[in-house]
Image: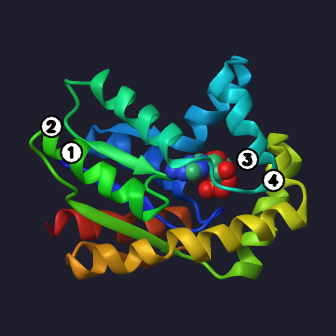
């Protein structure tokens, strides 16, 4: 199996690159952001609870997202591999992911980090907010809070995967196709 994590701050382009990677490598896409928004749109209890955190730019509790990822993986036993997009975002999530993959007798193959500076990210998110209608992309203080959460809780995972020799950073500014090629080069070198 090819299991990859697409890593990076909000607005780095994880969703865009994931779409391209999953069609090239025939992978299943797990975006916890998309799964949470689908729950909210369906008006489920879980979706309503999660939305309170999302609206403030805070992370949703670990148990909620870990359970969602587990259900998704169990529902796709035929998968040739997974792209984890927006997950894991905390150390407990990373530990839980390792355990889930062990149950599938597999592990993380590679972690690809999209590196983009904060000013560029704010510009991109505000622009995305205009077209997507995502409330968490429309308010600069919510966006800044998401960066704070990223710095405090998610960025430490870069070191976690670096220590395992799995992390590869790619410059996330420039042409989508050029960034995609750089990501593919790291995968193809495995
Ligand atoms: P972005 O990466 O652009 O912020 P996402 O769609 O990945 O957008 O996530 C939107 C929001 O959903 C996050 O700000 C957070 O509140 C919540 N969320 C998504 N994934 C997770 C996760 N793995 N753990 C906790 N909260 C999450």
Is the distance from the Cβ of mark 3 to the nearest ligand 1 atom less than 8 Å?
A: yes
The residue pinned by badge 1 equals 101
Cβ–Cβ below 8 Å for labels 4 and 3?
yes
Q: Earlier in the sequence, mark 1 or mark 4?
A: 4
Residue 47 rendering spot, x and y as whole percentages: 67, 28
Q: Are marks 1 and 2 in contact (CB under 8 Å)?
A: yes
Q: Marks 4/2: CA distance?
A: 35 Å
* Mark 1 nearby-residue class (10 Å; few <14, some 14–19, many ≥20): some
Marks 2 and 3 sit apart, C-alpha to C-alpha, by 31 Å
Ligand 1 closer than 8 Å to label 2 CB: no
Label 4, label 3: how far apart the Cα atoms are? 5 Å
Q: Is residue 38 above or below residue 184?
A: above
- Cα gap from disc 1 to disc 3, whole angstroms: 27 Å
Q: Is residue 46 above or below residue 5?
A: above
Relative to 162, 143 lies left or right? right
Q: Secondary structure at mark 2?
A: loop
Looking at the image, the residue that sits furthest to the left is: 105
Left or right side of 189 for 26: right
In the rendered image, is residue 15 in sight? no
* Side (left or right) of 177 relative to 164: right
């Amino acid at each position: 199996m090819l299991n990859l994590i697409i890593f990076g701050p909000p607005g780095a382009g994880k969703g865009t690159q994931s779409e391209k990677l999953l069609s090239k490598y025939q992978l299943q896409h797990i975006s916890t952001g998309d799964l949470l928004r689908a729950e909210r749109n369906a008006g489920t209890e879980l979706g309503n609870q999660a939305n309170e955190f999302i609206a403030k730019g805070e992370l949703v509790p670990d148990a909620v997202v870990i359970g969602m990822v587990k259900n998704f993986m169990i529902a796709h036993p035929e998968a040739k591999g997974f792209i984890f997009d927006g997950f894991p975002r905390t150390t407990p999530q990373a530990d839980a992911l390792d355990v889930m993959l062990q149950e599938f007798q597999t592990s993380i193959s590679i972690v690809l980090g999209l590196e983009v500076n904060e000013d560029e990210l704010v510009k991109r998110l505000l622009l995305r907010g205009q077209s997507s209608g995502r409330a968490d992309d429309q308010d600069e203080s919510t966006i800044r809070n998401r960066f704070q959460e990223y710095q405090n809780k998610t960025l430490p995972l870069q070191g976690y995967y670096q220590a395992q020799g799995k992390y590869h950073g790619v410059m996330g500014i420039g042409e989508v196709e050029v960034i995609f090629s750089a990501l593919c080069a790291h995968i193809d070198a495995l």
